[in-house]
Image (cartoon, helix red, strand yellow):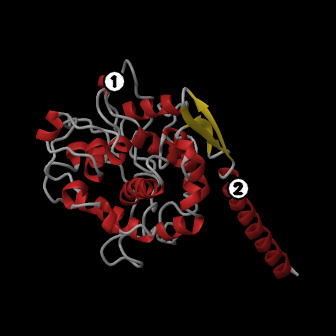
Amino acid sequence: MASQKVSAMVVFLLTLMVMVELTMADMSEETKVKIVKGKKVCTRGWECSEWSKFCCNETITDFFQTYQFEQLFAKRNAPEAHAVGFWDYQSFITAAALYQPLGFCTTGGKLMGMKELAAFLGHVGSKTSCGYGVATGGPFAWGLCYNKELSPSQSYCDDSFKYTYPCSPGVDYYGRGAIPIYWNYNYGAVGEALKEDLLNHPEYIEQNATLAFQAAIWRWMTPMKKGQPSAHEVFVGDWKPTKNDTLSKRIPGFGTTMNVLYGDLVCGKGEVDGMTNIISHYLYYLDLMGVGREEAGPHEVLACGEQKAFNPSYVASSSS
């Protein structure tokens, strides 16, 4: 009798999951179009609900399904992983829905959308991986293994921001999230953007997968400083390098996304492991998504080993 109840519950849960996925897909296809100032703008249901030219394009659920998420992050719920049950497809899509009307994976057509998704998740996978050379399933199957730093070396409180983002007593600002956030000033800035009190409660990031994905996508879509590009703009080609950028060997493409996100912690150091690991995740994800790594471009587009940092590092660093 007990086994029958368990079986019935499993069937119910599987049916519910299928219904949720079908509902999400159906809603994303409800495209409405209007002309504003001579230009076409659209909405596409909950996933692209604001009127935007980007909503006229395909959205993420059109080309990225649950099974693909499971393939990319195949070992995230293995017994050896450190965030079992935390990360899931629906949390990612829910977070992405806020940014797709702004062009996140909806810029430049389906192929560019798929490439941007692989690029973003390549960063996520490499930064949250517990894979290694001989890991079961290969070193790239272990993305989203972590949702926080397990053995912080410090509290990551920078007192020079005490008037803008003062450290909360007893709170540690170690790495948390899909693209880990470090330091009080970064938690403060992300919290302001997402309307969450992350300065006093950075633990929210490790408690809510949707919020953790939102923080990472916000970081991808947002320039570090005025006059600089975002990782999104760099990747999709919306950024035009200045003469100084060219002299600094910064060019549009995946390599410069690493410069935007990590600066000289990764870039300008030649062929270091930190850089090549991120690139390898991106290429692996392109293959798994059916795009193919040949679409990634030449090495000078993929890498940042010769680039000068947009923002040279100082004692308090913005990322890991």
Name the residue rendered at 51%, 72% in the picture: 78
Q: Residue at x 24, y 62 (%)?
A: 276
> Where, by quadrant of the figure, is residue 89 drawn?
bottom right
Q: Which mark is residue 26?
A: 2
**Left or right of 82, for residue 175:** left
Residue 207: percent from the left, percent from the top? 56, 48
Q: Observer-nearest residue: 212 or 95? A: 95
Q: Which amino acid type is shown beneath numbered disc 1?
A: Phe
Q: Position of residue 216 (x, y in %)?
A: 45, 45
Residue 75 position in % (x across, y down): 48, 71
> In the image as oriented, which residue stretches furthest toward the left?
247
**Closer to us: 16 or 185:** 16
The answer for how far apart the CA atoms under marks 1 and 2 are is: 46 Å
- In the picture provided, is 50 more to the left or to the right than 147? right
Whether residue 208 is visible: no
Please state, as top left, top right, bottom left or bottom right, where the N terminus lies in the image. Answer: bottom right
89 is higher (above) or lower (below) than 290: above
Indicate left or right for 112 with 294 as reference: right
